[in-house]
Image (cartoon, helix red, strand yellow):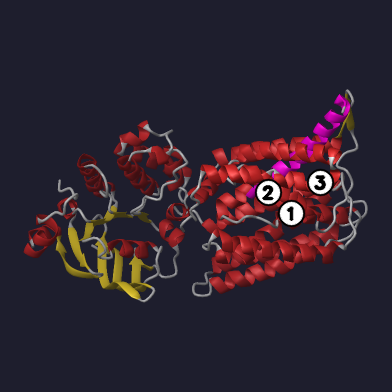
Amino acid sequence: MSALLTVTDVHISYGKVEAVRDVSLDVARNEIVTIIGANGAGKTTLLNAIMGVLPLRGRTTFGGVDMAPLDIEDRVATGLSLVPEHRELFGTMNVEDNLELGAFRITKAVAVTSLERVYTLFPRLKERRKQLAGTLSGGEQQMLAMGRALMGAPKLLMLDEPSLGLAPIIVADIFRIVGELRAAGVSVLLVEQNAQAALQIADRAYVMELGEFVLSGPAKDIAANKGVAASYLGFQHEGESAI
Amino acid sequence: MNTTIMLFLLQDGITNGAIYALLGLALVLVFAVTRVILIPQGEFVTYGALSYAMLATGQVPGTARLAVAMGLVAFALDLFFARKALHARLVIRSVALNIVFPVALLGLVYALVGPHTPIAVNIALALLIVAAIGLFLYRIAFQPIAHTSVLVLLIASVGCHLALQGLGLVFFGAEGLRGPALSSAAVTAGPLRFTGQSLAVYGLTVGFIVALWLFFGYTKTGKALRATAVNRLGARLVGIRTTLSGQIAFLLASVIGAISGILIVPITTLYYDTGFLIGLKGFIAAIIGGLVSYPLTAVAAIVVGIVEAFSSFYASNFKEVIVFTLILPVLVLRSLAAPQVEEEKD
């Protein structure tokens, strides 16, 4: 199976501080890959750099094409999509307008089928389609952010902490939908602190610590790894939910 | 004061207010999309008005040549910023927009100019010239610093205003100009006489407001502009080019400014620096609207126009002072309502 996204020997710095060091990863078509790790490990930085929000050193390709000369908008057009940690919705516009803008780069006919698909995945959004995005609950905002990203019919969806700050029941819902995306032909690169939930739906996983990948392999093996279990699965910090 | 005078003042105030409303709306639009407080808006007014007036006398205005010069600079900037990844498509697009368009426009001006050119042609040429200048102004002065703070953008904006005003003196000279009226028709209603010109002012203002409302509420491009205003990163993540949004905003603002100028120049003599003061009154309306609300800005602009008309009747020496004082209570109220003003993070 050919790789959809490849990231080779990537370094990302904030000024003199190197936040991500010598990281390589790949995501194949129809694959769900997760990056787990503690807060501040550099996971969000890595996703933002892959999207083009932050500059990086190293080589990234998407669908076999070198991404270095492409800016964010070009990367969106090639089928890469990011649901950022802070969701970045259009708060003063309604749900339907947000979704419609998600399909900004594609033709109207495709957008209509995309909208139906998103409403099937997230019936809540259909109920609230005339409501302003800023007035939605946290879970609904996360659904809207994912829906908006899916409207552009991406080949690879990158999700940054979709479970952050959400009630466990909604987290379960969102992870179920992420699992369903594979059937729709969308690959997923998922960044999560909720390692247990992420490892359950992922095919493969990378473990990130202090800006480096320390472990990678099939999600099952990672979940069975004793070190990982001790660091990320066994001892949940207070306030973090383990579903 | 008798009723007739009051009606005259009201009519005068509403006519001026309508112009300020157009300018205020353009300011709100540009600020929302690009966070630039568009001080050079007044220069768009002057350039539109005086280019039109010069075309009407059969001369080629210097602004047409300025558009070509600015296009060359914009082209050079395009090449410089894209030097690491030059695609043929990008270069062709840049040549078409920055070189072919203004040069063709200049050629068109030379071909069509004359003492007997129809008014409509002169208006179209003046609008196109100012539209080109607005577009290139964004490319040259604001696009390279689009990510900086509001304050930096404001300083750049003041710089553009000074530069354009100085160039205005070079192009149009120190003497004022007047342009021919759009129509000589007039309607009398009671004591009031509505000239075709003032009816055109009302009609175009209402038309523009409705058009802007439809554009922002119902078109994909309009919604994309709003989205850019609400969340720049979010807009980029769905593939909306914020630079394109900025260009569209400046294009609209310059066209609106030029139309305002063309509407005023048959009524009053305009000098190379008159636009600034007119633009400032639009700015007051925009500030009263909090730089976000279109309807509030439009209403405030009408109020500014009426206050100006009455104060020029009662205390004409203090006309500007009274008008600009309107801003003080608004600023006080707004700062009380929102004590913490946070700089938008980008």
Chain label for disc 1: B
Q: Is residue A65 left or right of residue B173?
A: left
Q: Is residue B306 magenta?
A: no
Residue type at mark 3? Phe
Q: Residue furthest top?
A: B190
Please identify, in this view, whether the residue under mark 2 or under mark 1 is nearer the observer. Answer: 2
Q: Secondary structure at mark 2?
A: helix
- Of residues A215 and A237, the one drawn nearer to the viewer in this rendering: A237
Sequence order check, earlier mark of 2 and 1: 1
Q: Residue at x 56, y 55 (%)?
A: B35
Q: Residues within 10 Å of mark 3 (few under 14, many from 20)?
A: few
Chain label for disc 3: B
As drawn, the label of residue B318 is 3
Which residue is denoted by mark 1 in the rendering?
A: B42
Chain label for disc 2: B
Give the CA distance from mark 3 to mark 1. Answer: 21 Å
Are circles 3 and 1 on residues that touch, CB within 8 Å?
Answer: no
Give the CA distance from mark 2 to mark 1. Answer: 10 Å
Give the image location of residue B328, x and y in percent: 66, 46
Whether residue B333 appears in this view of the structure is yes
Q: Residues within 10 Å of mark 1 (few under 14, many from 20)?
A: many
Please identify, in this view, whether the residue under mark 3 or under mark 2 is nearer the observer. Answer: 3
Q: Which quadrant, please, contains the N terminus of chain B?
A: top right
Question: In this picture, is A6 found above or below B312?
Answer: below
Give the CA distance from mark 3 to mark 2. Answer: 19 Å
Which residue is denoted by mark 2 in the rendering?
A: B283
Q: Is residue A60 left or right of residue B211?
A: left
Residue type at mark 1? Gly
Q: Magenta segment, which residues?
A: B2-27
| Location of residue B146 (image quadrant) | bottom right
